[in-house]
Amino acid sequence: MTQKARPTSLTAPLYRLYERRLLRQLDPDRLPRHIGIILDGHRRYARAEGLETYSHSYRSGMRRFEEFLGWVAELPIPSVTAWVLSTENLARPAEQIEPYFNTLTEMFGRLPERTNRLGFRLKVMGSLDLLPADLVKAAKHAVETSRSDSPDAPKVTVAMGYGGRQEIVDACRDLVDELLGRGTPPEELAEHVDAAGIASHLYEPDQPDADLIIRTSGESRLSGFLLWQAAYAEYAFVDVFWPDFRRVDFLRALRDYAAADRRFGR
């Protein structure tokens, strides 16, 4: 993959002009209600930069995520889900995954100040029981200290230890448990399992379906992200590693989304 040139002292003013132009072109009524973003490409970024370890690329990526939240806060976008760690990622070698756990823990330590200043509500979803105790503790503390006073405040959800298939399996199990708890006979369960029931037991059931999925690093696949919620989403596959993701890349994705003819299968 060819990395995009980073702004220099000469090109940065041009990028800012282009960003302002893109912002003016965006119709607030055609912006997505829910953006899912896959923060992909940390390790390849490290190799491309000739870094000796992945720790620097992980830290750069999480700083970019915090910066990204500021870009979102400028616009009337009520919900963002960021996939920072999949269940499959957990099988990576310890020398790769442990520094990432540490970076996520550090990021959650900083995140409340950022989300509170921007007015976000913070959520975390996934199989947290698969993650290190220190990371889970930091994430839960960040959620507890990042509560906006307004129920209408935009929400950012961090998905870690997350897999879309497992989310659907968990939702089905929870729905069956609920039906049994209400006295539904086992032989009648199948009659009561429907799409609305499953949707109501997803990890974040109050979230709208994803309108736009952004994935960095040039990969053109979902890899199991928001499988249920992204049934009619538009996709933006951005040919840049996550630590180098730019505001202009984000605005271009929004511009293309706004121009799409969304038919929802009709």
Image (cartoon, helix red, strand yellow):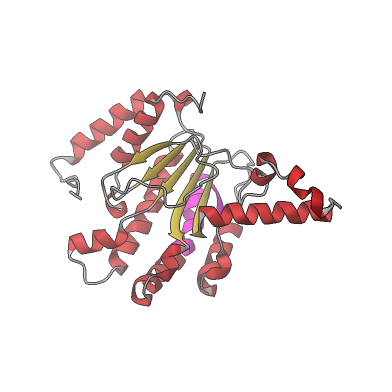
Residue 70 sits in quarter: top left
Q: Is residue 129 left or right of residue 176?
A: left
Front in this rendered view, residue 183 or 12: 183
Q: Is residue 15 visible?
A: yes
Outermost left residue: 10
Residue at 41% across / 48% down in the picture?
222
Inspect this view and state whether residue 106 appears: no
Rendered image quadrant of residue 136: bottom right
* Magenta stretch encompasses residue 123: yes
Residue farthest bottom in this picture = 94
Residue 264 in picture, x, y percent from top left: 51, 28
Question: Residue pushed farthest front?
Answer: 187
Q: Check the image and report above or below for 110 versus 5.
A: below
Residue located 29% across and 27% down the image: 21
Q: x%, y% of residue 198?
A: 66, 46
Nearer to us in this view, 189 or 87: 189
Above or below, 5 relative to 57:
above
Q: Is residue 120 magenta?
A: yes
**Nearest the camera: 160 or 170?**
170
The region drawn magenta spans 106-124
Whole-percent x and y of residue 88? Answer: 44, 63
Q: Is residue 31 above or below residue 107?
A: above
Give coordinates of residue 261: x percent, y percent: 42, 23
The chief SS type of the magenta part is helix
Q: Residue at x 82, y 55 (%)?
A: 181
Q: In the visual, does 53 lie left or right of 84?
A: left
